[in-house]
Amino acid sequence: MDTQLLNNLKKLEQYLKERNLDLQIIHALIGKYVYIRYLYDRGILSKEWLVENNLNLDTVLSRKATLVGLLHLTEVLENRFNGAVFPLPPNVETIVGDEIVSLIASTFKGDDPISGQLHLDFEAYDFSYIPVETLSSIYEQFLHSQGTGKQVGAVYTPEPVADYLLCELEESKPLRSGMKILDPCCGSGIFLVLAYRKLIELALAQSPNFIKCPISAQGNQLGL
């Protein structure tokens, strides 16, 4: 599933580039859909919340998605979370049409963006279960395909390297429950995710009742 998603996103990127869409806009649109699907599949965009805000996700996630629908949801999310994620340019309505938005939405449903082959009615991807490694791979693809990562100090850290550094840190500053963990150059969040996993492993080893008292990452893990 993860390989199929990455392959289809690469195809989608290439298809849109060949139609002279700016790479920054392509990545903003793809990133925004990753963000929206993650919020929805994790239950953060509940049915009750959608109704309260007069939102119809069919205008964003279905094969009939529209730019108006995407921009409306984007505005509501920016107000809810007090900030923009993968911002689009102010003149996006003169650059991006409904056909591009619907193509991106259909790709996230599992359709092939090149051949147009449709996926079956069930969802091809469940972002509530897609591992952080896959999300990190998407992040890496966006940075390095533009070739500007090193210029702006944004360099993707592969999981094995992040894990190795945490193991080295363990000798001088062992992880303990209740510690505050800071990643001052946070990108994909791989350091924070692995640190959180190590805290969970530590708690599991120390207490069989850990599942009843889970560790909270809120307030203890910070990324800049």
Image (cartoon, helix red, strand yellow):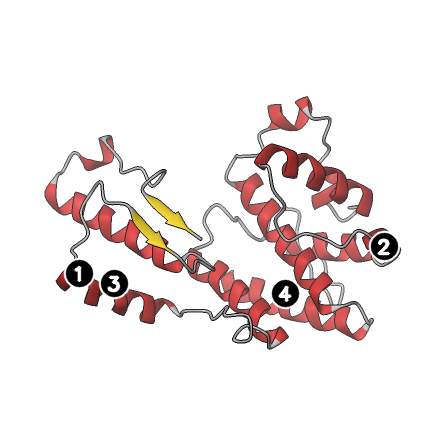
Identity, as a three-letter code, of the amino acid under mark 3: Leu
In space, the residues marked 2 and 3 are separated at their CA atoms by 45 Å
Quick one: label 4 or label 3, which is nearer the N terminus? 4
Quick one: label 2 or label 4, which is nearer the N terminus? 4
Q: Is residue 165 left or right of residue 153?
A: left
Contact between labelled residues 3 and 1, with CB atoms less than 8 Å apart: yes
Q: Is residue 32 left or right of residue 71?
A: left
Label 2, on which residue?
A: 97
Contact between labelled residues 4 and 2, with CB atoms less than 8 Å apart: no
Identity, as a three-letter code, of the amino acid under mark 1: Glu
Residue at position x 47%, y 62% from top? 136
Q: Where, by quadrant of the figure, is residue 59 drawn? A: top right
Reply above or below: 30 against 161: above
Nearest the viewer among 110 and 31 is: 31
Which circle marks residue 9 in the picture? 4
In space, the residues marked 1 and 3 are separated at their CA atoms by 6 Å
Label 3, on which residue?
A: 166
In space, the residues marked 4 and 3 are separated at their CA atoms by 31 Å
| Closer to viewer: mark 4 or mark 3 | 3
| Closer to viewer: mark 2 or mark 4 | 2
Nearest the viewer among 34 and 165 is: 165
Q: Is disc 3 surrounded by few (<14), some (14 to 19) or many (20+) residues within 10 Å?
A: some
Q: Is residue 109 visible?
A: no
* Label 1 element class: helix
Reply above or below: 119 against 167: above
Label 1, on which residue?
A: 170
Task: Pinpoint residue 158: horizontal percent, then vertical percent.
Answer: 40, 70
Task: Pinpoint residue 53: horizontal percent, then vertical percent.
Answer: 69, 26
